[in-house]
Amino acid sequence: MANASIQKVEKKGDSKGSNLFAVLAIVLCLVIGALVWKYIMGHPSNFENNDPEGHPLPGNYLGMVYKGGYVVPVLMGLFLMSVVFSIERLFVINKAAGNGNVETFVKKVQAQIKAGNINEAIAECDKQQGTVANVVKAGLLKYEEVKREGFDSERAEAAIQQEIEEATSLEMPMLEKNLVVISTLVSIGTLCGLLGTVTGMIKAFSALGAGSTPDSAQLANGISEALINTATGIATSTLAIIAYNSFTAKIDKLTYSIDEAGYAITQTYRRFRARANNNA
């Protein structure tokens, strides 16, 4: 219980640090997006006559994107968030996988457990040093405890399963943290892109309705703004949804590995009790 309390305190501290990182990352990405849009894309050298209010130079993509309007820096900030949080989750989940291949580790542990070599299985967990290894080790230590206490199969299985679930509840939240940010970016990226598209089309139709002769420059700017915002919003949502699905699949794989090892532990105890009863 003391170890569990220490782990909960550590996880709580990690959670606060992660929340602070998320807030700072969101603010910083939006600020960087605004600065890049204003001072790099909106630099006079990207436009005819060095006038940011005029037309971009032919083939100058920075100037073209700048003409996307005030929604562009927001979309750029959202895109940067997708990149930052994807890299952060990739680092955390790869670290949680531990040293070496998870599937190979689970097979080794299963073989050791089935052979009754619990100490060797615990040693494999210490080598792996990942989320799966931590949870499996907790289950193995509980196995040793119920074995010493002489629990019957049903009580032992319930105790081991509860220990594995408690260990999982300590490990998994850190893996899933910030995934909600990535999943939210999927929707927000699309909606902000749509907002920019609508504002651009409003400008385009305003140019068509201005007097008897449409303002071709304003019409072109409006259409350009609409298309740029559409493209940026789609790019943001695409990156976010690919990252979210990829990380969810990795977490599901880790969860399945935990269930697989936990089942092996409980079945080994059943066989142990069956042999003990037969010998008696």
Image: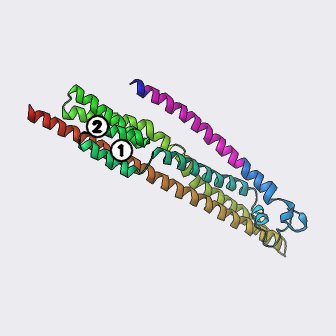
> What secondary structure is marked by label 2?
helix
Residue 114 in percent (x, y) is at 24, 44
Pick out the residue farthest to the top: 2
**Residue denoted by label 2:** 118
Judge by depth and name the residue closer to the eye, 52 or 115: 115
Please say whether residue 161 is visible from this viewpoint.
no
Q: Residue at x 55, y 45 (%)?
A: 178
**Residue denoted by label 1:** 258
Please say whether residue 29 is visible from this viewpoint.
yes
Judge by depth and name the residue closer to the eye, 271 or 124: 124
Looking at marks 1 and 2 on the same chain, the residue that comes earlier in the sequence is marked by 2
Q: Which amino acid does label 2 sit on?
A: Ile
Q: Residue at x 74, y 63 (%)?
A: 65
Q: Which residue is drawn at 46% across and 26% down?
A: 6
Q: Quadrant of the C terminus?
A: top left
Q: Which amino acid does label 1 sit on?
A: Ile
Judge by depth and name the residue closer to the eye, 256 or 193: 256
Neighbours of disc 2 within 10 Å: few (<14), some (14-19), many (20+): many
Q: Quadrant of the N terminus?
A: top left
Numbered range of the magenta stretch: 5-30
13 sits left or right of 144 in the view = right
261 sits left or right of 271 in the view = right
